[in-house]
Image (cartoon, grey):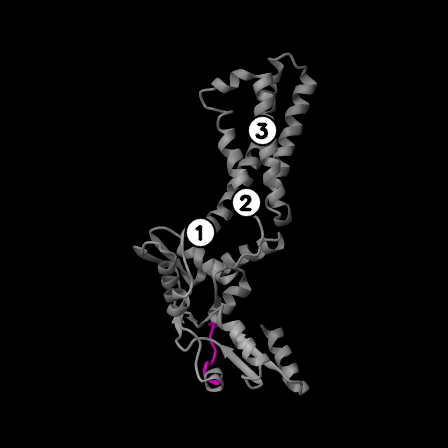
Amino acid sequence: MRSKGRGDAALRASGAAAWILRPGLVIGQGAFGGTRLLRMLAAVPLVQPVALGQAPVQCTGMADLPAAMGAALCGKLPQGTYDLVEDQVNTLEEVLTETRKWLGFAPARMALRMPDWLLPPIAGCADALGRLGWRSPMRSTAIAEIQNGVRGDPQPYRAAMGQGLAPLQSIYQSLPAGREQRLDARMALIMPIAVAVLSLFWLASGLIGLWQLEAAANVLLARGWGSFPAKTGVVFWSLADIALGLAILWRPWAAWACLGMAGVSLFYVLAASVIAPQMWADPLGSLVKVLPGTLLSLITHQLLQER
């Protein structure tokens, strides 16, 4: 934001013809960044998690942005700097409530307000995930922006155009919301949980295989394998499990890691069916449980697709 401010100042100082348009929290049919986080939080069932709930927020409807740019290009908007924000100042908690209502979720039974002292460690974790390629909307810069408030002065634009921008309620009334928006919000909420579960599952699988090397090798020894190839096979596939559990944490590789998990899982099932078919009758369901894990990998692969 500071670099944007310096750029604005340099542009004004240059004497060039310039229109500087500064929107607030942009709300449109799609959801990215801050609006994605709003929908994720609004999708939490029963309770409404909220941090910095009293932070001031002024919103901007996506439809108002091209309208303002069109007015500038057509000469209807004089040169200058304009904050493209609604007249009313909402609190962040009020914006969350309106978002939840627009999505069609049941009202929260209670608000789960996070104390401010939790924000620095959460931001630190989000910043660390950013180094792994994950674009979390909870990074320290985003939290600092919310703490400062998303505000502007709507009067210069209103004076120039004779009307202001649509308020929050009107923005949401103009946007259709159906099953796909609710499903997208819920899936966005589940995606990081699915990634964490898959990573922990595959890391645990590999580490347990190395820890219980003798027990795992005995399954192959009972089928006539030699000691060296049996133990080598267990070590190899345990290391493959660990590699996949780590790979899904690196965002550029995460989707491919999900496909690798599904492929390795299917290989395990097929190989076990040939080498030790009695494992299908294991009372703990050691092979049966591979199937839902494979499906979770494929679902997570889809959730990780970029726009």
Left or right of residue 62, residue 89 in this image? left
- Between residues 65 and 217, which one lies in front from this camera angle? 65
Residue at x 44% of width, y 20% of height: 283
Which stretch did the figure color magenta?
149-156
Q: Can you give x and y, in whole percent of width and height, for residue 12 in the image?
A: 63, 85
Please name which of the two marks, 3 or 2, marks the residue nearer to the observer.
2
> In the image, what residue type sits under mark 1?
Glu
Magenta stretch, overall SS = loop
What secondary structure is found at the residue carrying circle 3? helix
Q: Can you give x and y, in whole percent of width and height, for residue 140 in the image?
A: 54, 63
Residue at x 46% of width, y 80% of height: 154
Q: Residues within 10 Å of mark 3 (few under 14, many from 20)?
A: some
Q: Residue furthest toward the front? A: 74
The residue carrying mark 3 is: 266
* Labels 2 and 1: the sequence-earlier one: 1
- CA gap, disc 2 and disc 1: 15 Å
> In the image, what residue type sits under mark 2?
Gln
> In the image, what residue type sits under mark 3?
Leu
- Height in image: 85 above or below 273? below
The residue carrying mark 2 is: 302
What secondary structure is found at the residue carrying circle 1? helix
Q: Can you give x and y, in whole percent of width and height, for residue 101 in the image?
A: 35, 60
